[in-house]
Amino acid sequence: MDHRTPARRRAPRAARATLPLLALALLAPACTGGVEGKPGAAGVRDPYFPKLGNGGYDVTHYALTLDVDPDEQTLRGTAEITARATQDLSSFNLDLAGLTVDSATVEGRPAAVNRAGDELTLRTDAKVEDRLRKGETFRTVVHYSGSPKTITDPDESEEGWLPTDDGALALGEPTGSMAWYPGNNHPSDKAAYDLTVTVPKGLTAVSNGVMAGPPVTEKGRTTFRWHTAEPMASYLATLAIGEFETKTSTTAGGITVFTAVDPEVAEASARTIARIPEVVAWESEHFGPYPFSATGAIVEREDDAGYALETQNRPVFPGPPDLGTLVHEMAHQWFGDSVTPKSWRDMWLNEGLATYAGWLWGEEKEDTPADESFDNAYEDEDNWAFPPADPPSAAEISDEPVYGRGAMVIHKIREAVDDDEEFFALLRGWTKKYRHRNASTADFTAYVEEETGQDLSDLWKAWLYGRSRPAADG
Ligand code: TRP
Ligand code: ZN
């Protein structure tokens, strides 16, 4: 089952706006006395996106305040970023694509901001040096504004800021969050979020987490506040602004269900959306306790995005979702959102396991044994283009092998375990061990071998890393 829209719209590459450098007369060397700080790295050397993320600090909290004008497609924003230094810093970077930085402070002191492409370098004066020592927590405030841009990925799909007929939709896999706020834009640095968004009265602003109070309308504008307590990767942050029919309820297990559906697709979405609690309950049985305090969905119009996305708590669907897509995106709440890849090379852990969730649903609810889904995937040539744990390029991290062959790896593990009770305990143990954390492919294979007590190196070699198609029973 391919839940992505295969036809990608090719968008003209937006000309990179020339951005005024913030010239501050404060470029005094950051380190006078004590320990010499070093610049934080401009990237975390992701194998596919080396410039994403930044070194030298770890964000614990983002407080974003946005004022959005959907008619003009502009915003004014303030990002308050609380981070802990992981080295002595003389300067550090944030990722931001487009937009204009109006001013910035670190620990309340003006910071000089240098800009090169999507990298901001912030440097402050000697007075805050002590706060940028390894282990210290420091607060950065960035004021910014402009027209957020749509980012075209290496595979031609669009993310970042997507204007819609009635507002806008922000999607961030793999890089798009930096189109609407500055931060440490890599899945390896998860953080809590508070988002305050003001939009014209009559529109709704929906994001991750839970509503932190009732919307407040003043002078024709309404402010919405969203709180995400559990750690969230930047690629899973979302913001949907538009006309929405919203509903709040609570599951039997006490999880808040918040859904926002575009009125144009409300009727066509109702049946599937009503099954969210059932899907969450079924997946909780198989994958362990639901990892967040809230769930739900955001349903936009079909043309508003080219694909569904597992945004935390509240996946986004372009048009009425089918049940299979709902099962897939919800499974990502465990596989991807709670247990998050360490790098974009570990993508198959997201997509392989979420695809396998669909195979399990097919087996238990729709009389399609997982063996049959496996056979279909095995026969599909597209799944054999490359090994799932090693996509050849950034343009291929969301191609078929990552999904279908990734799921085949999970099925092979199930066969090796040869006991469904044990197999599901293995999945639940995985989500428990790495709950709200990051995990790599090596973490996964080590975990499976340790839990099963089996040497599975042949399985990994053939199914996870091998270039050619192994025998189906190999
Ligand atoms: N993760 C999404 C899903 O499976 C699909 C997707 C959208 C994606 N954008 C992407 C995958 C970018 C990799 C990279 O539901
Ligand atoms: Zn997916």
Image: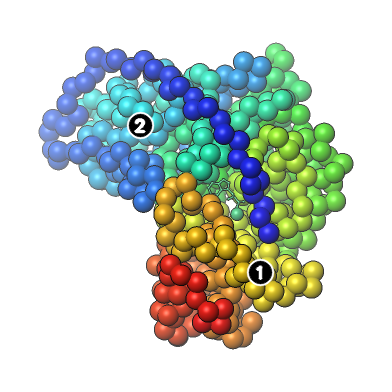
Residue 402 lies left or right of residue 138; in this view the side is right
- Asked whether 405 or 61 is in front, the reply is 405
View quadrant of ligand 2 = bottom right
Q: Amino acid type of disc 2?
A: Glu
Residue 101 lies left or right of residue 112; in this view the side is right
Rendered residue at 70%/41% (across/down) = 318
Measured as percent of width and height from the top left, residue 370 is found at 68, 74
In the depicted structure, whether residue 4 falls above or below residue 432: above
- Asked whether 437 or 117 is in front, the reply is 117
In the depicted structure, whether residue 159 falls above or below residue 443: above
Measured as percent of width and height from the top left, residue 167 is found at 68, 26
Residue under pointer 1: 376
Label 1 with label 2: CB-CB less than 8 Å: no
Q: Amino acid type of disc 1?
A: Asn
- Confirm whether residue 9 shows in the render: yes
Labels in figure, total: 2
Residue 191 lies left or right of residue 66; in this view the side is left
Rendered residue at 35%/40% (across/down) = 51
Rendered residue at 73%/38% (across/down) = 302
Q: Quadrant of residue 307?
A: top right
Residue under pointer 2: 119
The CA span between labels 1 and 2 is 44 Å
The way the protein has been coloured in the rendering is rainbow
SS at badge 2: strand
Q: Quadrant of residue 326?
A: bottom right
Residue 28 lies left or right of residue 254; in this view the side is left
Measured as percent of width and height from the top left, residue 297 is found at 71, 46
Measured as percent of width and height from the top left, residue 443 is found at 41, 67
Tell me the crowding category of disc 1: few under 14, some 14 to 19, or many 20 or more residues within 10 angstroms, Cα based.
Answer: few
- Confirm whether residue 171 shows in the render: no
